Image (spheres, rainbow, N blue to C red):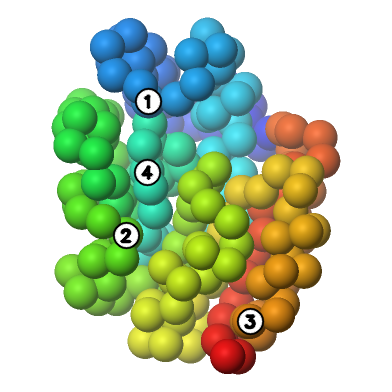
Amino acid sequence: MDLNGRRVSRETQERLEHFVALFQKWAKSINLTAPSTISDAWKRHIADSAQIFQLQQQPAHWTDLGSGGGFPGIITAIFLAETKDGWVDLVESNNKKAAFLRTALRETGARGTVHALRIEDAPSVIKSVDLVSARALAELDKLFHFIQPWAEENGALKSMLHKGRDYRRELDKAHGSWSFDLVEHPSAVEQDSVILEISNLRRLV
């Protein structure tokens, strides 16, 4: 199986397939994502989320913010299951979605823990972070507020953030209050979308 032009092992493929079945089942009763995207989960969600790990293929400690339906956090955790190293802390305040995420981790054997708490409270529980991910969560300025405590703790912290076509306006706004290094990775799935790789995040004002 290929995802974004990269080979995926049979073991990981089976885990992803099981996750998609769970996602489609649970999405019938709780709002995991926009209903119009459920039937096309492989392209709209799995392939899109897989880019995060494919750009940072290392068994690191991730924190995924606003994990919702498991994108990209569960997908990263599934890839880490093959490495037998690394971990994902998934932060999701909605208890029903958190229950889904726990079920997905358990049934796929993915490497992660679910924290049913507000993102603002997460740094007091999740102390050590190498990489932060978020998809369709908030504008960059707000995301940077969430990420700042971990950036202060770890100067080598990187954030991998999915953004749509309006991302340049968000970057311009964020530059008014934040200093950061940026690498733009064009999306392999969605035209005009990007993965923003942020490092050396520091608040200016």
Q: Is residue 123 above or below residue 41?
A: below
Residue occupied by mark 1: 32
The one nearer the camera, 85 or 92, is 92
How far apart, in angstroms, are the residues tagged by discs 4 and 1?
10 Å
Residue 75: percent from the left, percent from the top?
A: 43, 38
Circle on res. 119 = 2
Is residue 146 left or right of 127 when viewed as pictured? Answer: right
SS for callout 2: helix
Residue occupied by mark 3: 177
Residue occupied by mark 4: 67
SS for callout 3: loop
Three-letter code, disc 4 = Ser
Task: Please identify, in this view, whether the residue under mark 3 or under mark 4 is nearer the observer.
Answer: 3
In the rendered view of the protein, which quadrant contains the N terminus?
top right
Q: Is residue 84 visible?
A: no
Task: Please identify, in this view, whether the residue under mark 1 or under mark 3 is nearer the observer.
Answer: 3
Q: Residue at x 82, y 41 (%)?
A: 192
